[in-house]
C-alpha cells in the first residue's frame, strides 16, 4: 500500500471555520465541481445540491451549504467571504436549491451531489465526499465512477469507447512531454459512452486543448485545475 | 526514497539516514511534489504564522459565536493565567487559553489552519506557540516541528482516519494530540523514537473519544476539549522525554484507533444523533440559539 498523503493534508488547509470536513472540504468540493463543469457559474445559474449523511444532518451548523456554494463561486477555503457565499450567489443571480437525500449505505457520510441544470435541459452531476481534514474525492461524474481528488491537475474526457482512443490521447501528451500520473477510464457499456480522467504533473499548455479536442470520439473535454 | 506507511518504517528511515522525523517528512514532500525544499518550508512557515494569528484573534473574543455556544472563555482563561495564582501554573494555563482561542476563532468564521482538522485545530498551534514563548524557539524551529507533526500524521491518515465522521473525536483530537506531542518532543531535541513514544502516549489515552457536538456546532465540547487536550499532549511529551515506555508501538495505537472507529456507532460520529448532542440540556440550548 502506498501512502500518498502530503504534509499539507495533515497541516492545513488554512481555512475559514468551523469544520475542515464540513466547511473547508465543502469549499474544495465546490471548487472541484466548478472545474469539472467548466469553470463558471455565470452560464449555469441553476444548481441543485443534495446532501447525504452527516452533511445533511449537521451541515447547517458547520456552514456546509455556504462552503459548497463558495467553492462553486470560485472562492478559496481561506477567503473571508466564504461566510457570505449564499448572499453572494443570490446577488449574482445564481439559483441554488438544497435537498437532503439518502444516497445509500455505500456513500461516505460527508457526501454531496451537485447537479448543474443547463437551460437546454441537459444536466451534469458531480458526486463527491469530504473525507477529512479538508481532503475531498469526486466519486462520480454523470454516473461514471471516478477517483478525482484535486491533488493534481487533471484532464477529463467525455468520449465514446473505441479502440485506440487512449493510445491517441497518451501519444499526443507524450509528444508535448506531459507526464501522466494516473489514468482512469469507465464506460457505461462496451462500445458506448465513456469517461476518462488523466491526472498530470503540471497544468496542460493552454494551446494543446484544441488539439486534444480533435481526437476522434471526444464529446467533451475539460482541464480541471488542481485545488488550492 | 523516503516513502513509508508505518511508524516502524519511518523510524527505520530516520535511523538509516540519521535524521529527524521533520527532516524525513520534508525530504518526502520534496520527492512527492517536485517543489523545492525552500518553497515547501516557506508554505509551512506561513501556516505557523496563521496559527499564531488565530490564537491572538481568539484571545480577543469577548462576544458569543452565532450559535451562542462559545465565546469569551479563552480570554477568561488567559486572565486567570496572568492572575498569578492559577491552579496549573501560568504556562500551562496559557496553553489551555491558546488552544481554546483557536477554536473560538474557528466558531466565529475566522481563519485557522486545520491541524489536522478544524475541530482539533487548537492543540498543535497552542503547544508550539507556548514553546516559542517559554523556550525561545524561533519560527524556523517551530516550522520544522510542524513537519514532525505531518510526518507522524500521514501514518494515521494512511492507516486509520482523521475525520470525526469516520472515527469519532479520537480521530480528530486524538490525532492532533498525537502529532502535537511528537512535535514538542522533536522541537526539544528528543529522538524520533521519543517522538513516536510521545505520540503513542497521547493516542492510547484518547482512544474511544466520540464526536457528539451539541447542535452539530464545533463548539461544545470542542472548545474546552482542545484546551484540555493541549495539556494532554504536553503530558505525553513529558512522559516520553522522561524516557517512559508506552509498551505498545505507535503503529499498534493507530491500529487500535481504527478498530475502535470502525466499531463506533454512527450516532457518535459527527451526526448529532447521540451523546451530548441529544442530552436534555443540549435540546434546550438549541432552542435558545
Image (spheres, coloured by chain):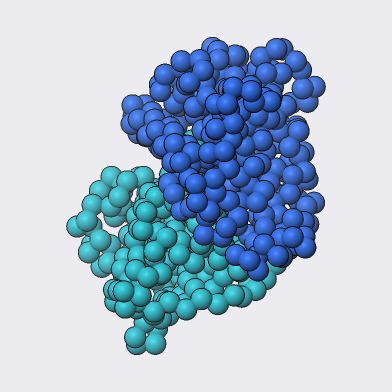
Chain colours: A cyan, B blue
The one of B112 and B97 positioned closer to us in this rendering = B97
- The structure residue drawn at horizontal position 35% and vertical position 65%, both measured from the top left corner, is A73
Q: Is residue B248 visible?
A: yes
The one of A187 and A88 positioned closer to us in this rendering = A88
Quadrant of the rendered image containing residue B161: top right
Residue A67 image offset from top left, x and y in percent: 46, 61
Residue A27 image offset from top left, x and y in percent: 44, 58
Measured along the vertical axis of the image, is residue B124 above or below residue B214? above
Measured along the vertical axis of the image, is residue B270 above or below residue B21? below
Q: Residue furthest left?
A: A207
- The structure residue drawn at horizontal position 78% and vertical position 25%, both measured from the top left corner, is B248
The one of A137 and B240 positioned closer to us in this rendering = B240
Q: Is residue B181 left or right of residue A34?
A: right
Residue A140 image offset from top left, x and y in percent: 52, 66
Residue B8 image offset from top left, x and y in percent: 67, 25
- The structure residue drawn at horizontal position 64% and vertical position 25%, both measured from the top left corner, is B86
Q: Is residue B120 left or right of residue A177?
A: right
Q: Is residue B186 left or right of residue B206?
A: left
Measured along the vertical axis of the image, is residue B200 above or below residue A152? above
Measured along the vertical axis of the image, is residue B225 above or below residue B195? below
Q: Residue furthest bottom?
A: A120
The one of A92 and B60 positioned closer to us in this rendering = B60
Q: Quadrant of the N terminus of chain A?
A: top right
Q: Is residue A8 visible?
A: no
How many marks the image carries: the answer is 0
- The structure residue drawn at horizontal position 46% and vertical position 53%, both measured from the top left corner, is B109
Amino acid at each position: 500500500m502506498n501512502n500518498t498523503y502530503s504534509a499539507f493534508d495533515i497541516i492545513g488547509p488554512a481555512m475559514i471555520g468551523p469544520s475542515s470536513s464540513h466547511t473547508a472540504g465543502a469549499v474544495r468540493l465546490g471548487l472541484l465541481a466548478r472545474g469539472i463543469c467548466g469553470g463558471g457559474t455565470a452560464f449555469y445559474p441553476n444548481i441543485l445540491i443534495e446532501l447525504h449523511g452527516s452533511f445533511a444532518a449537521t451541515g447547517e451548523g458547520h456552514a456546509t451549504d455556504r462552503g459548497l456554494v463558495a467553492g462553486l463561486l470560485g472562492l478559496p477555503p481561506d477567503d473571508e467571504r466564504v461566510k457570505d457565499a449564499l448572499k453572494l450567489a443570490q446577488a449574482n443571480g445564481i439559483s441554488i436549491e438544497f435537498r437532503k437525500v439518502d444516497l445509500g449505505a455505500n456513500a461516505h457520510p460527508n457526501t454531496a451531489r451537485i447537479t448543474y441544470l443547463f437551460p437546454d435541459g441537459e444536466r451534469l452531476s458531480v458526486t463527491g465526499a469530504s473525507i477529512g481534514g479538508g481532503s475531498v474525492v469526486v466519486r462520480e461524474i454523470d454516473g461514471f465512477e471516478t477517483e478525482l481528488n484535486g491533488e493534481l491537475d487533471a484532464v477529463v474526457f467525455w468520449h465514446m469507447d473505441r479502440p485506440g482512443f487512449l493510445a491517441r490521447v497518451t501519444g499526443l501528451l507524450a509528444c508535448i512531454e506531459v507526464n501522466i500520473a494516473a489514468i482512469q477510464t469507465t464506460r457505461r457499456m462496451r462500445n458506448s459512452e465513456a469517461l476518462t480522467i488523466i491526472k498530470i504533473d503540471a497544468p496542460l499548455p493552454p494551446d494543446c486543448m484544441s488539439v486534444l479536442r480533435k481526437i476522434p470520439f471526444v464529446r467533451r473535454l475539460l482541464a480541471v485545475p488542481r485545488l488550492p | 526514497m523516503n516513502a513509508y506507511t508505518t511508524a516502524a518504517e519511518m523510524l527505520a528511515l530516520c535511523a538509516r539516514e540519521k535524521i529527524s522525523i521533520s527532516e524525513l517528512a520534508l525530504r518526502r514532500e520534496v520527492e512527492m511534489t517536485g517543489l523545492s525544499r525552500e518553497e515547501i518550508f516557506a508554505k509551512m512557515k506561513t501556516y505557523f504564522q496563521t496559527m499564531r494569528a488565530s490564537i491572538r484573534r481568539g484571545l480577543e473574543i469577548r462576544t458569543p459565536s452565532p450559535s451562542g455556544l462559545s465565546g469569551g472563555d479563552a480570554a477568561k482563561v488567559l486572565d486567570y493565567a496572568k492572575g498569578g495564582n492559577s491552579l496549573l501554573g501560568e504556562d500551562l494555563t496559557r496553553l489551555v487559553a491558546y488552544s481554546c482561542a483557536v477554536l473560538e476563532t474557528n466558531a466565529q468564521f475566522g481563519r485557522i489552519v486545520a491541524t489536522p482538522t478544524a475541530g482539533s485545530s487548537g492543540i498543535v498551534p497552542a503547544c508550539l506557540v507556548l514553546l516559542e514563548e517559554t523556550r525561545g524557539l524561533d519560527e524556523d524551529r517551530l516550522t520544522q516541528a510542524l513537519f514532525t507533526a505531518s510526518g507522524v500524521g500521514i501514518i494515521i491518515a494512511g492507516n486509520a482516519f482523521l475525520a470525526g465522521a469516520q472515527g469519532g473525536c479520537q480521530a480528530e483530537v486524538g490525532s492532533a494530540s498525537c502529532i502535537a506531542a511528537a512535535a514538542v518532543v522533536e522541537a526539544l531535541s528528543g529522538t524520533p523514537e521519543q517522538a513516536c513514544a510521545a505520540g503513542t502516549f497521547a493516542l492510547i489515552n484518547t482512544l474511544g473519544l466520540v464526536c457528539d457536538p451539541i447542535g452539530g456546532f464545533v463548539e461544545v465540547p470542542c472548545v474546552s476539549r482542545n484546551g484540555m487536550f493541549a495539556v494532554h499532549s504536553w503530558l505525553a511529551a513529558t512522559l516520553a522525554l522522561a524516557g517512559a515506555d508506552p509498551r505498545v508501538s505507535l503503529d499498534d495505537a493507530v491500529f487500535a484507533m481504527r478498530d475502535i472507529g470502525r466499531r463506533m456507532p454512527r450516532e457518535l460520529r459527527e451526526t448529532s444523533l447521540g451523546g451530548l448532542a441529544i442530552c436534555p440540556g443540549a435540546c434546550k440550548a438549541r432552542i435558545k440559539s
